[in-house]
Amino acid sequence: MAHFVPGDLVDGRFRIASLIGGGSMAMVYFAVDTHADAPCAVKFLEDRYLRSTAQLRRFRAEADILARVKHPNMLAGVHTGLDYGLPYLATEYADGGSLANHLSEYGPLPPRQAVSAAIDVCAATFAAHRQGILHRNINPGNVLICEGNIVLSDLGLVKMSGPAHTKVRGSLDDLGFVAPEQRMDARYASVQADIYSIGATLFFLLRGAVPLSLYANDPREVYGDMAAELVHIIARATQWRADDRHHSVDEVEQELRQALETLPLDPFDAIALNPTEPVAAKNTGNRPETPDPCPERSNRPVAVVPELMWRPLG
């Protein structure tokens, strides 16, 4: 359910412009940060999770990780807090959408563009791993395009030293990006599981097809005319046994960089990842001067948020 409408002012700072969308856990809005005069995205936890301590902690964990893991290819956190009892997380706005959206509109990426995107995902994931954080949900829907740059989103799932916070669930398409051991038991989340997801994501970017059980299929049928060096990297990253995959994400990145040097130039008419519509144009008319045009929000129930302290990202 949408809590806010265009013109609402969240926490005295974020002016809601429109609803971007929502999943099973959260609603995300396009907004303007009035302090920085910049576009941003504001995520609110869904109503049914507001009394779940576990889900609130997970939501808080995402904000904490965005504060800890700062990297050019990681979605940047802006602020977190409470508004009318509702916890929110504001991040930079990915004006180009996700790679999943891009492929659904334009089709598979040319090889050099796909490999470059995978290198950026590796760099962000390795930065998280160095902080002891596993992503556990790398897929094209969580790889965003922000002013033409690739950024990884949806962190906050599990620490390397701790148990998984959620069960692995989703559609068959989603499971195509999940390592086999992780599908059977989420407690097996590991560096190698993230590596599997990166390899599966790269396969999707190149082929435009969900990589269902790459380890169980005839490579000649699965990879087609894909460059041999890319087949080698993806096949190793998506092995059935975790021990047979790369040892670290940094190793995957180095192999991809070497492969990039040998790949021919992409077609001159390849679709760029830059957004087709300037952010400034999207903001036009989305900054009403009234302080808060929805006083009826004061009549909405105030959520009880247990055992959590909300503070600015730092």
Image: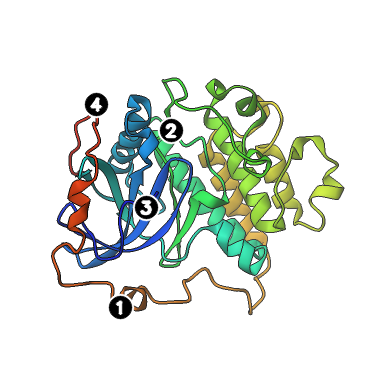
Q: Position of residue 307 (x, y in %)?
A: 23, 24
Q: Position of residue 102 (x, y in %)?
A: 57, 64
Say which residue label 3 marks. 2
Say which residue label 1 marks. 284
Q: Is residue 116 visible?
A: no
In the image, residue 240 sits, relative to residue 231, either above or below, namely above
Cα–Cα span, label 2 and label 4? 20 Å
Q: Nearer the viewer, mark 2 or mark 4?
A: 4
Near-viewer residue (140 or 286): 286
In the image, residue 11 sits, relative to residue 49, either above or below, namely below
Q: Position of residue 103 (x, y in %)?
A: 62, 62
Q: Nearer the viewer, mark 4 or mark 1?
A: 4
Of labels 3 and 4, earlier in sequence is 3
Say which residue appears at 50% left-offset and 52% top-offset.
143
Q: Is residue 135 visible?
A: yes
Residue type for callout 2: Leu
Near-viewer residue (168 or 4): 4
Q: Which mark is residue 157?
A: 2
Cα–Cα span, label 3 and label 4? 22 Å
